[in-house]
Image (cartoon, rainbow, N blue to C red):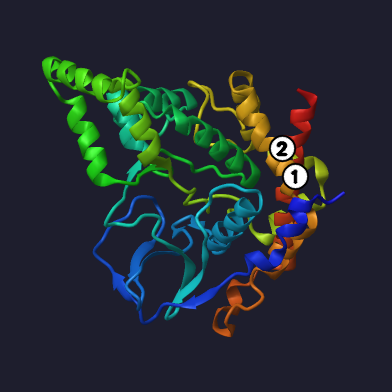
């Protein structure tokens, strides 16, 4: 039975835009983090966008990867995850996905997770590829009094399980600081001498009639100005590394398909253990049952296979003729639908069995 929520979120909300950015200003000298071929573009209206092509290098030609970014974006928003909206863009003979800048550069800043972890674990910079764990993320946020963001981390991990994202490294999640000036003031408070902090504490207690201490003030301000970034760089997902022949093989063999579904592992570990996506969620749920169950309930209320089929089926419907080679085959579309549907059902079924 379809709920009221799924009736509201119809596929019309997720029509893909195809944007010609050939006349936009291209910033070729600005480096962005990550491994993909990216450019910063400025639109004719002066707005900043990120343009990203599919990964291509010796031994790795993921031609359709930008579609994974776009489909993941639409599925994420359908299920109420805070995901950056992506559309198709083409710059002369180049095609890829495009997204508007997450932040207002005049009043906000984006701090990647890597910096938070290194602040608590300086040795992380020497082994960041193999020591990116849930515990390090949570511990780093707690140290900085950003505990309110732990729930967002859990949501991110569940979203990655749905799309099979294997590349959520520490530069692929971030915190948005919404007021740079206020954030600097908070930093300055933390650097005061013990005597100045004591004076400030007396002032706060006096003007707030005993309700505020420096610690409470610091925690409240951080909660007001520090928000978890919308999820970005989700393209290493939806089996983008497989060709049509392999996808067809998996579609025709349920045992092989199930093995493929379960062998995928996220970048984020549980301590030193590399669990698969579903094992990681079930393990986190032991310590955070309410947070995980709340996300599951939202997924259950908003998921519709019919909407999923419509999104994937029509994703490339209006692709300009010059890029016909980048249209998704019927096999790839069928595989993506089965892949997402299977992963959502595994997550929800595991929840009912626990």
Left or right? Give the position of 338 relative to 181: right
Residue 156, quarter of picture: top right
**Mark 1 Cα-neighbour bin, 10 Å: few <14, some 14–19, many ≥20:** some
* Left or right of 79, for residue 61: left
Q: Nearer the viewer, residue 239 or 299?
A: 299
User: Quick check: 84 left or right of 40?
Assistant: right
Q: Which residue is mark 1?
A: 301
> Residue visible at 59% across and 19% down?
287
What residue is at 54 percent from the left and 75 percent from the top? 18
User: Dot 2 lies on which element?
Assistant: helix
Residue 21's disc is: none
In x, y percent, where is residue 123? 29, 24
Residue at 75%, 36% in the rendered image: 348
Q: Which residue is mark 2?
A: 297
SS at mark 1 in the image: helix
Percent of width and height locating residue 16: 60, 69
Determine the image quadrant of residue 210. Answer: top left
Residue 158 vertical position relative to residue 46 in the rendered view, above or below: above
Where, quadrant-wise, is the C terminus in this rendering? top right
Using the rendered image of the protein, determine whether residue 12 is visible from the camera's viewpoint: yes
CB within 8 Å, label 1 to label 2: yes
Task: In the rendered view, tell whether residue 34 sits above or below residue 140.
Answer: below
- Residue 56, position as x, y percentages in the image: 45, 60
Coordinates of residue 96 in the picture (x, y in percent):
48, 68
- Would you call the spot at circle 2 few (<14 residues within 10 Å), some (14-19), or many (20 or more)? few
């Amino acid at each position: 039975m379809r709920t009221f929520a799924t009736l509201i979120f119809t596929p019309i909300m997720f029509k893909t835009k195809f944007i010609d950015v050939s006349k936009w200003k291209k910033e070729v000298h600005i480096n962005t983090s990550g491994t993909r071929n990216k450019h910063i573009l400025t639109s004719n209206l002066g707005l900043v966008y990120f343009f990203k092509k599919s990964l291509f290098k010796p031994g790795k030609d993921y031609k359709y990867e930008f579609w994974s970014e776009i489909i993941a974006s639409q599925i994420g928003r359908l299920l109420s995850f805070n995901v950056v909206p992506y559309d198709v863009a083409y710059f002369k003979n180049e095609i890829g996905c495009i997204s508007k800048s997450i932040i207002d550069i005049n009043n906000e800043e984006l701090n990647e997770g890597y910096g938070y972890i290194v602040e608590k674990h300086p040795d992380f910079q020497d082994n960041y590829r193999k020591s990116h764990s849930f515990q390090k993320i949570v511990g780093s946020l707690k140290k900085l009094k950003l505990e309110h963001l732990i729930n967002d981390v859990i949501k991110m991990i569940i979203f990655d399980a749905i799309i099979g994202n294997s590349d959520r490294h520490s530069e692929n999640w971030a915190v948005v600081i919404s007021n740079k000036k206020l954030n600097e003031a908070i930093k300055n408070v933390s650097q005061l001498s013990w005597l100045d902090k004591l004076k400030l504490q007396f002032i706060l207690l006096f003007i707030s009639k005993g309700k505020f201490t420096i610690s409470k003030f610091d925690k409240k301000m951080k909660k007001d100005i520090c928000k978890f970034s919308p999820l970005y760089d989700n393209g290493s997902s939806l089996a983008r590394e497989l060709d049509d022949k392999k996808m067809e093989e998996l579609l025709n063999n349920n045992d092989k398909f199930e093995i493929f579904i379960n062998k995928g592992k996220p970048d984020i570990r549980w301590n030193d253990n590399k669990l698969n996506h579903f094992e990681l969620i079930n393990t986190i749920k032991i310590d955070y049952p309410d947070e995980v169950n709340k996300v599951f309930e939202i997924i259950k209320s908003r998921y519709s296979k019919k909407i999923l089929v419509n999104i994937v089926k029509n994703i490339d419907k209006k692709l300009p003729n010059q890029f016909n080679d980048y249209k998704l085959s019927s096999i790839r579309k069928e595989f993506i639908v089965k892949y997402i549907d299977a992963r959502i059902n595994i997550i929800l079924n595991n929840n009912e069995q626990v």
